[in-house]
Amino acid sequence: MSRRVLLVDSDVDALGALASALRAMGLAVANANSAESALEQAYQSRPDVVLVPRAPERGGNVREVFKERPEFADIPVLFLVDKMVDVDLVQDEVMRVDVDHIVSRITEVSRRVSRPPLPQDIRGDLEQVPLVDMLQLLAMNRRTGSLSITTARGPGEVKLAEGQIVDASFSRRTGERALYRLLAERRGRFAFSPGDPPTQRRIQASTNMLLMEAMRQVDELNERRASLSPEGEVFALSDLASLSGLLDGPESMPDPSSMRGRIFELLQMPRSIDELLDEIDGPDLDILDALVQLKKSGKVKTIPLATLTTPLATPEQIPVLRSLATRLVRPGFSVPPRLLLATSPQRLGVLAYSMRRITDVVMAPEPTSRAPLTRSLGTMRLGEGVEVAVIGLPTDETMAPTWALSLPGTAAVVRVGEAERAALEAHCEAVEVMLLEADKLIGQFDATIPAELAALLRAALEAAAGAG
């Protein structure tokens, strides 16, 4: 069974370096920076050996503090010596730089009694017992079963056989990638249930190596997350009208099957970091590095989280909009009146995304189709039973024959972006429907910002009612 070591040192750098070296040798290491914190850690981890610097100012009087507690009085304490000057080591001293000798001495002096067996079922809170500590504990006791974790991002599971991690699943990922993402979670609940060894083994590396690599990745991932999205911002392509417009010059369109290609595909509408990591295959660090480069090059922009939900209008504006909406029903056509947003098929998905984040808009119950077809984007509810349907009209000329089914009875058509104009204008004239331009109604328009879409809908409703 692996020895449990409590390492005490107020020098954070020295403590971290030695702790990593000891973990690499297969030891379970808990850290403390003073005699008082060492005592608290001892109650949690029940160490076999304590390592503390010989200099009292670095670790305090750990031996004396432990001797005052009968339950810890028999725990061996070894003193770490940084250098020797014409003096030999005494029996309770070890050279800090000689890791092999430290491990040998730990094995010699540690108690041979084994730790009391863990209960069959273990439950706890990640804020009190970090997942890495729980996995080390299960590894030391050679447990077999499943460790279930519940977090704000969803449930996860780690499967063990004889204390070794053999599989993990979390947030639509499996194997090592799922394990690393789970180990980054700091809040949640866990529960271990013993059981038979799993039949499938997706993880082959040793538990000690996995946990070391996980800690490295977690630190780097947190650093990149903090730089990319410090306030929870989401990401989208800078130019949603045309992907090729983002790559003018010597660069070509990225391969759709490549990591960059998948990022471009997904960011046609706003996505969070977690959504990108869930959808793209490959190491999380590589995905975030690619996102960093795209952001630096200006091909990807960030959108503040606060702008992703917005009201359709202020309470004072709603009665005015309601009054205008009652004037939009054309003779011979049923209610509710309709506004059509005419744009490229690519941008229709972005408009649907933004519509879902406008209060006072009710989305269509059916899922949004990816096919370039006329579709309902939502219904503006203005109170007292007054509604206005918002329809997305793809301006791809191959879809022009279907326009005749949507245009008659429409209050107005709003052309968004660089969508084709000549054919659309001819169809609108034929059925006497007003064709409006988004950029003339509200100026430069960004479909990824719900507040700007709400402003466009208000302006379009006013323009259509005024024309009536």
Image (cartoon, helix red, strand yellow):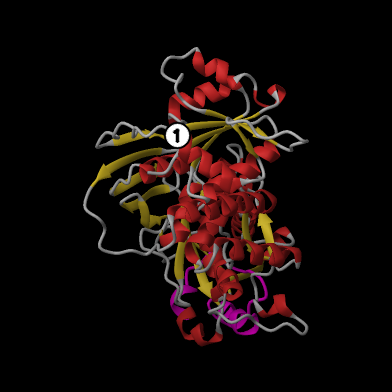
Could you say which is closer to the camera, residue 99 or residue 219? 99
Q: Is residue 118 left or right of residue 402?
A: left
Q: Is residue 363 above or below residue 151?
A: below
Q: Is residue 59 left or right of residue 380?
A: right
Q: Quadrant of residue 446?
A: bottom right
Residue lying at 36% horizontally and 62% vertically, measured from the top left? 366
Magenta stretch in the rendered image: 404-431
Which residue is denoted by mark 1 in the rendering? 110
Q: Is residue 362 left or right of residue 358?
A: left
Residue lying at 61% horizontally and 56% vertically, measured from the top left? 453
Kind of residue at disc 1: Ser
Q: Residue 368: image x %, image y %?
A: 42, 66
**Image quadrant where one finds the C terminus:** bottom right
Q: Is residue 258 above or below residue 139?
A: below
Work out whether residue 214 can be spotted: yes
Category of crowding for the residue at label 1, using alpha-carbon neighbours closer than 10 angstroms: few (below 14), some (14–19), many (at least 20): some
Residue 413 counted in the magenta span: yes
Q: Residue 223: image x %, image y %?
A: 66, 50
